Image (cartoon, rainbow, N blue to C red):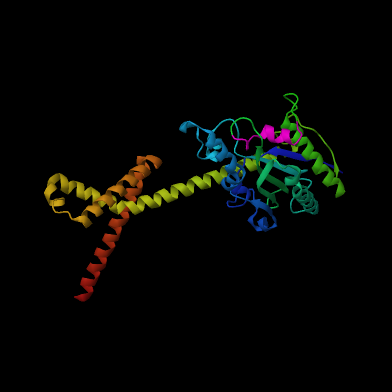
Amino acid sequence: MNRTISVMVGRGSVNHNSRKFHAKNTDPERSHLNIDYCNEDIKAVYHELFDEALQRYNDKQTRADRVITDYYEKIRSGEQEKPFHEIIFQVENRDDMSAVSAEGQLAAAVLDEFMRDFQERNPNLRVFSAHLHMDEATPHLHIDFVPFTTGSKRGLDTRVSLKQALSTQGFKGGTRGDTEWSQWVRAEKEQLASVMERHGIEWEDKGTHDQHLSVLDYKKEQRAREVAALEVEQAQKQEQVDRQEQRLKELAPAVKNLEQLAVQFSEDPEQVLPEAGPLESARIYREREEVRDYERLKRVIGPEQTDRILEAARQQEQAEKDRKRAARRKADLDAR
């Protein structure tokens, strides 16, 4: 039976790809079957690729405002180039090559062999994260890379450029429908097809109108990965909110103390501050900084949620006082 090849542009969720987070479409019990080819820090890769060129560029500048202090941040915050790209390869679909089937194992072997030569075939696409996933419905390969070109006449002589990176590798864009990217994707599909043939699998090229998207059979998998990426993003945001709530709970006693100091100061300033020595001054400064932290968090998660957390902390404090008071009363009664 002929098999198709699916190719799509990924969302670039490196933490999800490396399984720092699990989404609903993954089976953690099968994650040990995944293959991690590499998982490098992208900032370290930028230093490796561009630091020398960045130094040469900065040395030529006569205006301070043209000096680039962090090339990764410049690319990340700019609009001309993406800091990295992700491409996903898959053989057939989950109905024909499920990850838990013998056919799925064959698909994994094909993708693994294909990946082993990917960096050698693509010297201008610096791979920093690559993973073969066997814990989802169908085996598939995520490859994240930084495209770069050397000998540039503008900007850094070694710089980020997808178009120039692919052009250097021999893919010269002709028309809008036949760009460097579409030519490269077609060439990679042919490379994968040759590996399939070595494993006794025939390739059927159904073709696509846009190589940036998956073939039709891949749409369900694409949607599942979009949902998974969204779940990861939501989990990260919830973790951040949880940390903020914990910090607010820790700050609640200090805020309450400062509120009491504010009341005392308004009634009798001399009673609070007249003879404050170094230790007392340090304490007041520390508490003032804590209030500033409190205000920062208040701006982040909103005043309503901040007040709710603070009120919950006060209620917990009051409940603890009531508990201790009841325990003392019981002790007094027992003593009688």
Quick check: is 166 in the magenta stretch? yes
In this orientation, which residue lies closer to the viewer: 42 or 149?
149
Residue 314 appears in the picture as rendered: no
Quarter where residue 194 is shown: top right
Magenta range is: 156-171
Q: Residue at x 67, y 44 (%)?
A: 126
* Image quarter of the N terminus: top right
Q: Is residue 324 left or right of residue 243?
A: left
Considering only vertical position in the picture, is 29 above or below 268?
below
In this orientation, which residue lies closer to the viewer: 3 or 116?
116
In this orientation, which residue lies closer to the viewer: 50 or 272?
50
Query: Furthest-top residue in view?
Result: 175
Q: Position of residue 151 (x, y in %)?
A: 66, 35
Q: Is residue 255 left or right of residue 11?
A: left
Q: Residue at x 80, y 54 (%)?
A: 102
Q: Position of residue 94 (x, y in %)?
A: 74, 46
Q: Residue at x 33, y 51 (%)?
A: 251
* Image quarter of the C terminus: bottom left
In this orientation, which residue lies closer to the viewer: 317 or 55?
55
Residue 163 appears in the picture as rendered: yes
